[in-house]
Image (spheres, helix red, strand yellow):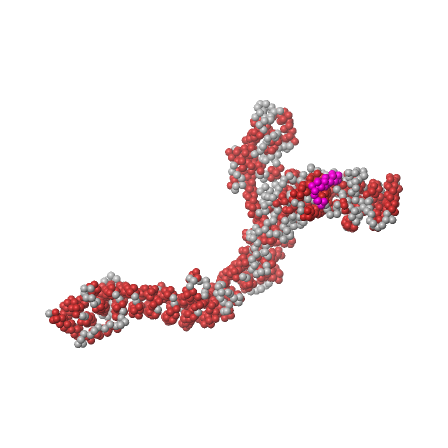
């Protein structure tokens, strides 16, 4: 191609011509060069002429054959010639004309490119090298190394890098220095990026080949093993102990087959040239003036001295090629595919790239370890510049590290063995730049390699950086740089959490995170330095410490951000959102895929869990397990602390907590393995004389194995774990056991004759160590002295002289010392010692470096598992352990650092700390932090009213921000926040100059509240008050107002639990405002109303919880003593209730009832008539406007009216009754289905209205109850369909009608009857029994039982008036009325009621008869009589038996037996006298009752009239009986029982009438009026009734006397008649005798009507007694009947005769 010819002409011809034209070419030393140039130029021209006749086909340019002429040019001493040659070489390499992959003619085993690079590097001869040549060298080396056309590897690569490195150090030109440095950076980037890219490409190629060829796992493993063998053969065993097992492939475009590339290669190389040119241009253009030439120092005059030699690396090209061919041959033998062979061949290339990277990396690590010269460090010295440059380059390598470098075992091993050790030296450098670079490298190691460097990171943290931060020997600048590094670490939350999990939760590791936070908090609180310069540095350190702490806390917030729910982002009102702890989530905030600690926030490495499967083994990221481990570790550390103070107590403590076993072996093992124990205390414990201590000491020594050890090494190992105690006896016991153990382990082959010899020698070795290595010993022991001291110790013989000399030599070289970990654990703290000298500072820093180096070298061979943290809840124990020092640091920083940025940092830290405590529900921490923040804001009642500074206002903003963003988690901390907001409103009112009652009261009472001088001045000086008001006025700006409003408007976004906490705390704050005796306020109460409106749209289940709190609060506020507050509460309730009622309610729910309950409470407990009237009017308005929406709320409405009905204010009662009446008369008709649930409450309300003080209202209310009964009767279906009462009342629908409908009506009517005045209760009685009579036919039998229980309540004396007069009136009116009504109802529904209620009715009648009220008792008897007369025809045998028993019982109850014995001298009880008089009446009434229900009331009178008529009549008339009489329905036994009762009454009356003295006594005592008392009526009526019963029984007996019935009846009849006639004969008074006339008429009439046989029988028994009657003056009718008797008797006698 034409382009090829032009390129050849351009780069070869012109370059050679330019060299020939150079004037230096004519010099004699350049003669060979001139000849070679001419020959080469002729050759090129001939080739061009030969190619001129050919077509335009492309001819590759082979420039390798032209290299010798340029090699000669490079060796020339002429700078211009060398520059031209280098320029041409750079272009040929760039455009792929000079590849150098052909074997070198001089060294066939090496490729030509090695010779090319060597020739180029030879152009640099030291500091005197021309600057232009230096620049050209840099350019051509950069092109060769970074381009894809040449293969520069191993030693050649190191040579190129070393040359650029030397140019940087030796060049005096600043441009060249910067270019060389930039070139080195570009080279390193190319070396490592090429390695990474090639590995990535190879991985993709391997996957593709496996997919295409179906390679199984065995073939893949074979490839891995082959690759590993290739790799192991290339890397020296001493330099690469841990080899990678990963697969590698060729980098795209790097294969030698691509050497002849055209445009693509041109594009790549052009980019390289562009980078280099830009680098040079930037360096030159960035300088404002030409840098001055530095003077040549003695160390830079010699160019060789100025160069820094990088390590040489053996060439592996030959072996690489042969091994690749062998690998290819093996692949053919195994019949693998061609692609597999390519892959295998390219693996070797990949290993070459890894070795290049490894060699370069190791070289710079070693360069960074070069020791600086003694004295003050010179920043211009080669050593210093070399160290700084190497550290810079190492930092750039780590920054750009890819997956291979981060995970390959070879590089990890190099980092451990070289970089970490180098870093441990440089990290304690006094040179700030070196120290800063070391910190930078450390941060990158932590960021990218912490999974592999667990032990190293611990050393860096504990022994170096945290030590420097806390050490007084460190400069402030060093500390500030440490803080800068810690800030970068804190910016990566992954690293922070990993540090905690892997160190603080590791039993054997240090508490890095704890120390980390503790030192930062400590640094944030350090005091200011006295001088200004140091003071500024201290302030900067404090500020930076705060920044670190804030960043750390912010990182923890970010780490657990997935557990956080911001209320402001929630769109669904009331949506619950709480992530369960322990759930594994992907941290989308941190990275697209959380890869644990293997990937930091800024890492782009591949998944380490895939690249290093070993990490999957044994790594347990379980927060619960780790937290338990941390707790155990805390116990262990506490025990160690106790041990280091008092060993025995420490051991006992650890055994108590099961941290160590109880056996001596367990304790000994613990002493061996725990490096944190104080060696001195271990020695003291082992040397104690107690039995346990001895056993532990024996076990401790037996734990060691001294087999095959020489005596000195054995004693070194023995004493490296503890410090020998100072007491000789303790040393003796310990060394005695050591000697015994040594001989046990080495029974043969020792020089000791016995254990005593070993014991003495061990003791002497200790003495020798003390003598030789103690600075206080002036005269040191010599070898001869030591030999002389040990004479005769081996059973009186000497030990071999050579043996003792060897011991002396070893001890002299190195004394016996503690293990480094033990010494470091027990070394005294060097912190905070104050001002120290520079020399002492250097010694302490060197000691720190030495310890770190020892620990680092020891850690390089330790494999420690690193937990890849993924769980979010690790933050909880982290924060619990550090929140207190964090809070202290932020508090001190806020109060004592007068810097705006620092103050904002403190507030931010507090806000983020609160966020963490909120997320994890740490109530103690959250409350403490919020309390601290509230103190910052000065929004507390305890601080009074003070001037607000800008920092206080910022604290207020932070508090408001927390309320807005963390509301879901504040729980009870809302109380503190809302108190501050309330106080903010107060100071806003004061600051705005509002002159209302509240602010005036505050100002007047300020001195009373707080007598501090501040408040005294505040309100005693107008000017001071104006200043404070002005500062307070700034809080009234729109920013604060809007922010506070956002808290309450944003309450709609709080979740269900949070809104409940919010409302609860707001209610508490509101109460505290209202209960302030001096200046009550309504701010929070108003906000409660507002948030109620805002949250009205929440679901009912949430509203129920909210209103449970709000309702109680409104109950309290509505009953406030402050009328304005109560009015506001009631009005707010009305508005909220109306708003809520508009939403309606489905049947079966009861939230309206809960919502309206505060009205009920307020009207009940607030005595103010105005408030009660307001409540009633609110209810009236709600009923008028929302009746169609009210469901369960009717219950509260009727409850309010119930309470209002008992008020004394007629207007209020009338208003409530009017509303109730309208509900019943109007709304019942339309909304009865809704009101039916509250039907009982409606009846209760009507009951209260009926019992009110206003009669008209009472009568109307009773009438409404009657109307309600109509609704129950007309709409039973509504009651049947009611649900929810089945468990209580049963499942039958009919029972629901009774329980929910009829029962409330009758019960409340009974209450009315029991409570109200006569007219009202009479009306109530009438309505009650009217309802019974009207609707009783629909009542079930069970209902009647409950109903009569209600009715019987009327007679309950517990409910009767207590005043006797009122009670008497009650008996005579209400009870009397009720009794007759009961009888009427019972009679009306007898068939239904009798089976179950008759006995109860009888009992109630008995109760009435027992009462002392005559009217009631007589009514009871009358009702007893009426029931029997009305229903007796329906009585069965059992009922009659019950009736007779009750009658007999009544007779017994009312019998006035005490009349015969009553004596006023013994008892002067007037009540007893009245009771006896009442019993007499009741006995008479009862006799009449029996007579009436047996023979009917009119039958007795008719019979008497018939008897009188028979006396004057000519014939004996027949006796007639009433058809409806009940006598035939009773059996003989029942009748005889009644006769028996009548006989007793007659006998009592007869005896009383015969006892004249007792009658006189009673008469004088006031018994029975104006005449002597008598019982003549009882006497006669009882006997008359008995005679009628007996005569009827005798009459009905037709069987004659011989029958059994007559034998039972006739004697009673005969005796009764005999008694009657005999008693009549004995009567002396005419009046008394006259009252007996009817009895005689009855006996004679009955006798005359008897048939003959019965007449004869009775005549024979009574004839003499009847004849005796003739002796007295009888009544005419009696005489006439007696005459007829005698006539019949005479005729009977004549007949017989």
Q: Which secondary structure is most common in the magenta stretch?
A: helix
Q: Residue placed farthest to the left in the image? A: 1697
In the image, is 459 to the left or to the right of 1450? right
- Image quarter (top left, top right, bottom left or bottom right) of the C terminus: bottom left
Residue 1335 position by quadrant = bottom left
In the image, is 1689 to the left or to the right of 91? left
Which span is picked out in magenta?
Answer: 315-340
Q: Is residue 1021 visible?
A: no
Q: Nearer the viewer, residue 197 or 742?
A: 197
Q: How many marks?
A: 0
Residue at 60% across, 58% down? 569
Residue at 44% across, 66% down? 1280
In the image, is 987 to the left or to the right of 59? left
Q: Is 318 one of the magenta-colored residues? A: yes
Q: Is residue 1509 visible?
A: yes
Q: Is residue 1256 above or below residue 209?
A: below
Q: Position of residue 765 (x, y in %)?
A: 60, 29
Residue 935 position by quadrant = bottom right
Q: Nearer the viewer, residue 792 or 1302?
A: 1302
Q: Position of residue 1638 (x, y in %)?
A: 20, 72
Q: Position of residue 367 (x, y in %)?
A: 72, 40
Q: Position of residue 1559 (x, y in %)?
A: 21, 66
Q: Is 1350 one of the magenta-colored residues? A: no
Q: Residue placed farthest to the top in the image? A: 797
Residue at 58% across, 33% down? 704
């Amino acid at each position: 191609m034409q382009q090829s010819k032009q390129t050849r002409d351009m780069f070869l011809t012109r370059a050679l011509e330019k060299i020939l034209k150079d004037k230096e070419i004519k010099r004699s030393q350049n003669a060979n060069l001139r000849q070679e140039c001419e020959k080469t130029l002729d050759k090129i021209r001939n080739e061009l002429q030969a190619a001129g006749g050919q077509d335009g086909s492309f001819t590759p340019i082979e420039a390798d054959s032209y290299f010798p002429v340029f090699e000669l040019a490079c060796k020339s001493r002429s700078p211009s010639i060398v520059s031209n040659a280098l320029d041409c070489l750079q272009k040929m390499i760039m455009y792929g004309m000079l590849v150098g992959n052909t074997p070198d003619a001089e060294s066939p085993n090496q490729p030509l490119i090695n010779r090319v690079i060597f020739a180029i590097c030879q152009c640099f001869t030291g500091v005197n090298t021309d600057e232009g040549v230096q620049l050209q060298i840099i350019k051509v080396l950069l092109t060769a190394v970074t381009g894809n056309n040449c293969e520069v590897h191993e030693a050649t690569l190191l040579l190129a890098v070393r040359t650029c490195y030397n140019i940087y150090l030796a060049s005096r030109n600043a441009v060249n220095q910067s270019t060389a440095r930039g070139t080195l950076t570009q080279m390193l980037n190319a070396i490592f990026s090429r390695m990474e890219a090639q590995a990535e490409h190879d991985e993709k190629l391997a996957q593709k080949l496996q997919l295409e060829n179906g390679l199984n796992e065995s073939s893949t493993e074979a490839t891995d093993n082959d690759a590993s063998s290739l790799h192991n053969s290339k890397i020296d065993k001493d330099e690469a102990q841990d080899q990678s097992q990963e697969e590698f492939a060729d980098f795209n475009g790097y294969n030698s087959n691509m050497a002849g590339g055209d445009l693509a290669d041109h594009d790549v190389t052009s980019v390289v040239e562009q980078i280099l040119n830009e680098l040079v241009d930037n360096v030159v253009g960035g300088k404002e003036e030409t840098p001055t030439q530095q003077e040549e120092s003695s160390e830079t005059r010699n160019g060789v001295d100025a160069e820094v030699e990088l390590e040489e690396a053996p060439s592996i090209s030959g072996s690489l090629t042969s091994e690749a061919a062998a690998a290819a041959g093996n692949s053919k033998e195994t019949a693998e595919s061609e692609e597999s062979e390519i892959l295998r061949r390219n693996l070797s290339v990949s290993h070459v790239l890894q070795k290049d990277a490894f060699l370069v990396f190791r070289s710079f690590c070693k360069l960074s370890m070069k020791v600086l010269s003694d004295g003050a460090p010179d920043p211009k010295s080669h050593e210093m510049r070399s160290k700084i440059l190497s550290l810079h380059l190492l930092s750039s390598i780590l920054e750009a590290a890819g997956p291979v470098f981060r995970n390959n075992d070879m590089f990890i091993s190099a980092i451990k063995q070289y970089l970490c050790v180098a870093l441990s030296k440089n990290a304690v450098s006094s040179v700030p730049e070196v120290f800063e670079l070391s910190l930078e490298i450390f941060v990158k190691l932590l960021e990218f390699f912490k999974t592999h460097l667990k032990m190293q990171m611990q050393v860096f943290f504990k022994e170096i950086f945290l030590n420097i931060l806390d050490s007084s020997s460190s400069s402030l600048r060093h500390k500030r740089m440490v803080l800068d590094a810690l800030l970068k670490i804190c910016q990566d939350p992954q690293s922070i959490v990993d540090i905690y999990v892997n160190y603080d939760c590791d039993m054997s590791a240090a508490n890095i995170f704890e120390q980390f936070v503790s030192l930062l908090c400590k640094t944030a609180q350090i005091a200011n330095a006295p001088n200004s310069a140091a003071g500024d540095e201290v302030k900067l350190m404090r500020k930076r410490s705060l920044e670190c702490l804030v960043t750390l806390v912010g990182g923890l917030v970010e780490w657990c951000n997935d557990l956080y729910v911001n209320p402001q982002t929630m769109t669904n009102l009331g949506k619950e959102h709480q992530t369960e702890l322990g759930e594994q989530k992907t941290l989308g905030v941190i990275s697209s895929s959380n890869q644990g600690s293997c990937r930091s926030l800024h890492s782009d490495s591949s998944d380490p869990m895939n690249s290093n499967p070993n990490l999957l083994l044994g790594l347990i990221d379980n927060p619960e397990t780790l937290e338990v481990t941390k707790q155990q570790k805390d116990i262990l550390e506490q025990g160690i602390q106790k041990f280091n103070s008092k060993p025995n107590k420490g051991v006992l403590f650890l055994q108590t907590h099961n941290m160590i076993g109880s056996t001596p072996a367990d304790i000994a093992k613990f002493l061996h393995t725990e490096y944190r124990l104080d060696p001195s205390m271990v020695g003291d414990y082992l040397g104690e004389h107690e039995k346990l201590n001895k056993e532990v000491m024996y076990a401790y020594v037996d734990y060691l194995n001294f087999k095959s050890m020489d005596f000195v090494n054995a004693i070194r190992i023995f004493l490296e774990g503890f410090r020998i105690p100072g007491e000789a006896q303790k040393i003796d016991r310990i060394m005695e056991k050591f000697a015994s153990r040594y001989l046990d382990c080495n029974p043969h082959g020792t020089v000791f004759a016995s254990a005593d010899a070993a014991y003495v020698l061990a003791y002497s070795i200790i003495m020798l160590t003390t003598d030789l290595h103690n600075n206080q010993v002036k005269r040191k022991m010599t070898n001869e002295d030591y030999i002389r001291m040990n004479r005769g110790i081996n059973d009186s013989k000497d030990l071999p002289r050579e043996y003792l000399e060897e011991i002396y030599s070893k001890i002299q070289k190195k004394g016996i010392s503690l293990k480094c970990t033990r010494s470091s654990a027990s070394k005294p703290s060097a912190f905070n010692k104050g001002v120290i000298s520079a020399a002492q500072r250097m010694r302490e820093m060197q000691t720190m470096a030495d310890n770190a180096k020892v620990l680092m070298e020891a850690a390089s061979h330790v494999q420690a598992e690193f937990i890849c943290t993924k769980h979010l809840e690790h933050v909880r124990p982290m924060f619990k352990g550090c929140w207190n020092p964090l809070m202290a640091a932020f508090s001190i920083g806020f109060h004592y650092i007068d810097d705006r940025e620092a103050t904002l940092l403190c507030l931010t830290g507090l806000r983020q700390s609160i966020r963490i405590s909120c997320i994890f529900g740490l109530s103690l921490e959250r409350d403490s932090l919020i309390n601290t923040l509230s103190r910052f804001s000065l929004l507390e009642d305890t601080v009074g009213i003070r001037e607000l500074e800008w920092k206080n206002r910022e604290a207020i903003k932070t508090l408001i921000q927390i309320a807005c963003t963390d509301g879901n988690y504040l729980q009870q901390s809302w109380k503190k926040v809302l108190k501050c907001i309330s106080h903010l409103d107060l100071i806003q009112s004061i600051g705005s100059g509002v002159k209302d009652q509240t602010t005036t009261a505050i100002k007047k009472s300020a001195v009373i509240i707080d007598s501090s001088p501040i408040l005294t001045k505040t309100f005693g000086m107008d000017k001071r008050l104006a200043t404070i008001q002005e500062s307070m006025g700034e809080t009234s700006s729109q920013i604060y107002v809007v922010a506070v409003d956002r808290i309450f408007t944003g309450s709609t976004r709080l979740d269900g639990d949070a809104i409940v906490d919010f409302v609860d705390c707001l209610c508490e704050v509101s109460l505290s405002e209202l209960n302030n005796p001096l200046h009550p306020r309504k701010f929070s109460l108003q906000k409660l109303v507002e948030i109620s409106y805002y949250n009205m749209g929440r679901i009912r289940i949430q509203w129920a919880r909210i209103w449970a709190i709000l309702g109680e609060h409104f109950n309290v506020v509505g009953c406030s003593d402050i009328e304005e507050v109560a009015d506001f509460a009631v009005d707010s309730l009305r508005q909220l209730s109306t708003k809520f009622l508009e939403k309606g309610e489905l049947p079966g729910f009861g939230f309206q009832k809960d919502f309206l309950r505060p009205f009920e409470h307020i009207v009940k407990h607030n005595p103010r008539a105005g408030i009660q009237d307001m409540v009633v009017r609110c209810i009236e308005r709600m009923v008028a406007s929302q009746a169609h929406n009210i469901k369960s709320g009717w219950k509260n409405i009727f409850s309010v009216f119930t309470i209002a009905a008992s008020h004394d204010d007629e207007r209020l009662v009338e208003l409530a009754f009017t509303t109730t009446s309208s509900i019943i008369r109007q709304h019942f008709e339309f909304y009865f289905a809704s009101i039916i649930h509250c039907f009982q409450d409606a009846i209760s309300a009507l009951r209260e209205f009926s019992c009110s003080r206003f009669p008209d209202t009472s009568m109307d209310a009773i009438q409404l109850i009657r109307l309600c009964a109509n609704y129950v009767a007309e709409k039973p279906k509504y009651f049947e369909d009611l649900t929810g009462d089945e468990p209580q009342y049963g499942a039958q629908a009919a029972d629901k009608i009774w329980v929910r409908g009829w029962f409330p009506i009758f019960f409340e009517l009974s209450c009315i009857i029991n409570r109200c005045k006569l007219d009202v209760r009479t009306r109530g009685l009438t309505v009650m029994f009217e309802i019974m009579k009207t609707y009783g036919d629909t009542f079930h039998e069970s209902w009647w039982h409950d109903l009569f229980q209600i009715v019987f309540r009327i007679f309950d004396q517990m409910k009767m008036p207590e005043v006797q007069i009122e009670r008497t009136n009650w008996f005579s009116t209400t009870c009397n009325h009720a009794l007759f009504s009961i009888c009427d109802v019972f009679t009306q529904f007898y068939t239904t009621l009798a089976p179950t209620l008759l006995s109860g009715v009888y009992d109630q009648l008995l109760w009435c008869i027992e009462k002392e009220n005559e009217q009631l008792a007589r009514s009871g008897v009358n009702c007893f009589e009426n029931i029997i007369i009305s229903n007796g025809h329906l009585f069965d045998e059992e009922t009659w038996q019950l009736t007779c028993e009750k009658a007999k019982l009544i007779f017994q109850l009312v019998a006035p037996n005490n009349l015969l014995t009553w004596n006023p001298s013994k008892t002067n009880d007037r009540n007893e006298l009245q009771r006896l008089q009442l019993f007499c009446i009741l006995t008479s009434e009862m006799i009449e009752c029996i007579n009436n229900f047996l023979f009917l009331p009119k039958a007795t009178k008719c019979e008497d009239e018939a008897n009188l008529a028979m006396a004057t009549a000519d014939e004996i008339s027949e006796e007639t009986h009433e058809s409806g009489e009940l006598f035939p329905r009773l059996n003989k036994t029942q009748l005889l029982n009644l006769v028996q009762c009548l006989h007793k009454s007659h006998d009592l009356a007869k005896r009383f009438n015969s006892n004249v003295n007792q009658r006189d006594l009673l008469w004088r005592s006031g018994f029975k009026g104006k005449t002597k008392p008598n019982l003549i009526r009882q006497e006669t009526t009882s006997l008359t009734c008995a005679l009628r019963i007996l005569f009827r029984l005798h009459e009905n007996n037709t069987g004659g006397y011989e029958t059994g019935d007559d034998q039972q009846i006739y004697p009673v009849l005969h005796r009764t008649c005999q008694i009657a006639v005999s008693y009549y004969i004995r009567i002396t008074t005419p009046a008394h005798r006259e009252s007996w006339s009817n009895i005689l008429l009855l006996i004679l009439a009955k006798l005359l009507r008897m048939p003959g046989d019965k007449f004869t029988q009775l005549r024979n028994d009574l004839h003499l007694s009847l004849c005796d009657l003739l002796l007295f003056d009888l009544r005419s009718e009696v005489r006439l009947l007696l005459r007829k008797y005698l006539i019949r008797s005479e005729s009977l006698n004549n007949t017989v005769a």
